[in-house]
Amino acid sequence: MKTNFLLIISSFLLLSSCSNSLYVSNTVNVPLLKEKGEVKVNVDQSNAQVAVAISDHWGVMVNGFYKAIEKKADNFVVQGTLGEAGFGYYKAFRKGFVFETYGGLGLGTIDRKQTYTTADNNVYWASFDAQGTKAFVQPSFGYGGRYFDLAFTPRFSFVKYTHFRAFGYTEEQLAADYLDNDRITKGIFTFAEPAITVRGGYKFIKIQAQYGLTMNLSPRPIKHNPSFASIGLVIDVARWYNKVKTEPGTY
């Protein structure tokens, strides 16, 4: 059973690493904060995220994303970065249930370089780089306990590419990736990114697994991964999980 679980998670990670995508969803930061002063840190293979409860109902978050893929056999290299900051409201209920909603802004870049072979077997390099801004809103409904967390988050992201520059591609190659005629820098792309987050451990440290879908709601096509997945470690600095369960107002 354990082997089957690991195979399923590995398949999800492979699905989320498609290297010809212009847009890749980062891990959704789902803090499920419950009290003022609580700090939650999540680190996985491509993300570093922090959330802090600045009052009993308001929180802030900062997200960092970096991913690089290199396929030496295909002479293919792509890397992307993203930084985000968000602010939001949370409400903790009895028995561990939490509602929260966050919104924020971010800046990102992507660079891709690859080789092509002509009909007469000449090899040449082609590359592009792009920059963009991102806004997001993400309500979450979940449960957070001493041993187990579960949350559903229907995130919506709005991406505006402010810069795109390509070298060495033919018009046909750009059209195949929907990069021709400056279509990338015209208008805003809207993505629905519903995600399920599961965490297991004890009190201040848990293992997190997350899986989500990436759906382009815009009328214009864009190369993007259909799904995203991650496995990471979550550290929670809080007082609520040390309270005696029989105390009024404890979780």
Image: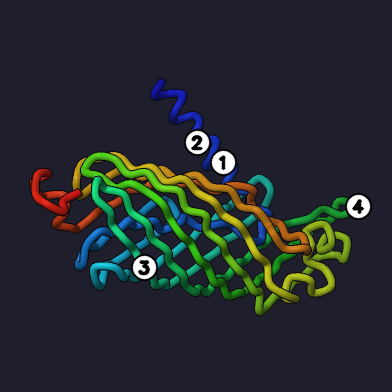
Residue 3 placed where, x, y %? 43, 23
Which tag, 3 or 1, sits closer to the chain's start? 1
Element at label 1: helix
Residue 1 placed where, x, y %? 41, 20
Q: In this rendering, which labeled residue sits more in front, label 1 or label 4?
A: 1
Residue that label 1 marks: 14
Quarter of the figure with residue 85? bottom left
Element at label 3: strand
User: In the image, is residue 242 above or below residue 113?
Assistant: above
> Pointer 4 and pointer 2: residues touching (CB < 8 Å)?
no
Q: At 73% across and 60% down in the image, what residue appears?
A: 222
User: In the image, is residue 187 above or below residue 16?
Assistant: below
Q: CA distance from mark 1 to mark 2?
A: 6 Å
Q: Which mark is residue 10?
A: 2
> Pointer 3 and pointer 1: residues touching (CB < 8 Å)?
no
Which tag, 1 or 4, sits closer to the chain's start? 1
Q: In this rendering, which labeled residue sits more in front, label 4 or label 2?
A: 2
Q: 238 or 130: nearer the eye?
A: 238
Which tag, 3 or 4, sits closer to the chain's start? 3
> Pointer 1 and pointer 2: residues touching (CB < 8 Å)?
yes
Q: CA distance from mark 1 to mark 4?
A: 34 Å
Judge the density around disc 4: few (<14), some (14-19), many (≥20) Cα neighbours within 10 Å.
Answer: few
Q: Amino acid at mark 1?
A: Leu
> Pointer 1 and pointer 4: residues touching (CB < 8 Å)?
no
Q: Amino acid at mark 2?
A: Ser
Element at label 4: loop
Specify whether residue 245 is in view.
yes
Q: Which mark is residue 120?
A: 4
Q: In this rendering, which labeled residue sits more in front, label 3 or label 2?
A: 3
Q: Which mark is residue 89?
A: 3
Q: At 45% across and 48% down in the image, what residue appears?
A: 152
Residue 50 placed where, x, y %? 33, 64
